[in-house]
Image (cartoon, rainbow, N blue to C red):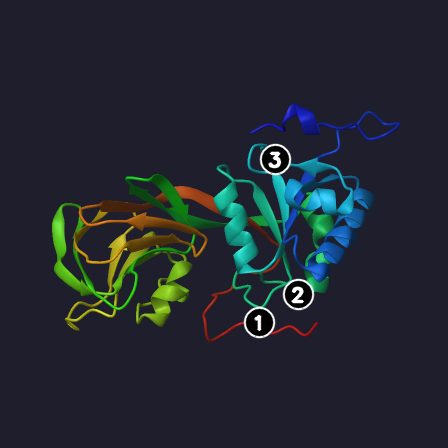
Amino acid sequence: MGWPRRIRHLLPGCGILAEPVAIYARPDKKESLELVREVFRRLKKLGAEPLCDISIANLLGYPDIDLRFSRINKIVVIGGDGTLLRLLQNIDYTPILHLIRLGRRAFLFDDSLEESLNHLSDFVNDRYYVEKFMRLIIETTWGKDIALNEAAILILGSKTMDLYVEIEGETLYDNLEGDGLIIATPVGSTAYSYSSHGSIIHPGLDAYIITPVNPIDKRLSPVVVPGYFRTRVLIKRTSRPVKLIIDGVVERILTQGVTIVATLRGPTVNIARYNKRWLRLPWRRKQYTY
């Protein structure tokens, strides 16, 4: 994957190609934009060519890149889980991501603010290992969506709906009556699925979990499925519109008779890491004071 021609740049006076590094952050937070300025300054000092996503570049007067349409090898993400998930919905390729924690919920952001700023030098000079996270491919009449955490199929309002669910052509739930269903990746199994009584999947497993949401029949428990299995969900009956929610970011309106197909074979999310791996659990998080 090469760099787009529009972002090639020679370092002044030495003829060396500077590697472009993009910066992505929320444009509506003052502290986020202040941190963008600091990251931009540090990247410049390290000999990289920093470029800000078009959503923030104009606010700061910095060189811009539209990450929706331009491919780049490295991106610095400033924020929390929501910022990361929004970025991933806007790009269709797999760059290396350096995460800088500036948010209330930051499950995948391992380092403190000071640590992540200091690791910018390691990021620019390729001194890291890559942790890969598998993603779901979700196919409907809308087309194809990709999910890092989960795809939630939920009825709107106070009514219930009936779902038929099968895995690899074998019936799992013949009639799942309730509020809906969550299909979650290993990392997503610690989020919405977990709060709906789903089990946590170890990140080393090639598997995903199917978790009913408030089923009328309490015998219908969550099921862990091999990653290469195809899960097919049919909306058998509903009197209200149904939402397909991808990572809490993308929403699709579905109707009775629509089929959703899922597999854990989406492009990976590649995150630069600088310390020993550790198991992330909802009840065991690193605590930082800023």
x and y, in percent, of residue 212 in the image: 24, 64
Is residue 237 in sight in this rendering? yes
Label 3, label 2: how many angstroms apart (C-alpha)? 25 Å
Q: Secondary structure at mark 3?
A: loop
- In this picture, residue 105 sits left or right of residue 195: right
Q: Earlier in the sequence, mark 1 or mark 2?
A: 2
Q: CA distance from mark 3 to mark 1?
A: 30 Å
Where residue 202 sits: x, y (%)?
38, 62
Q: Which residue is mark 1?
A: 286
- Is 157 left, or right, of 57 in this rendering? left
Between discs 3 and 2, the one toward the N terminus: 3
Task: Please identify the quadrant where the N terminus is shown.
Answer: top right
User: Going by the picture, which residue comes out furthest to the right?
Assistant: 13
The span from disc 1 to disc 2 (Cα, nearest Å) is 9 Å
- Nearer the observer, 289 or 240: 240
Q: Is residue 229 visible?
A: no
Q: Position of residue 117 (x, y in %)?
A: 72, 57
The residue tagged with tag 1: helix, strand or loop? loop
Q: Which amino acid lies under the numbered mark 1 shown in the image of this protein?
A: Lys
The quarter in which the C terminus is drawn is: bottom right
What residue did someone put label 2 on? 112
Reply above or below: 140 against 16.
Answer: below
Upstream in sequence: badge 3 or badge 1: 3
Q: Nearer the viewer, residue 58 or 37?
A: 58
Read off the residue under disc 3.
72
Q: Amino acid at mark 2?
A: Ser
Asked if the residues shown at circle 3 and circle 1 are in contact, with their CB atoms under 8 angstroms apart, the answer is: no
Count of numbered labels shown in the rendering: 3
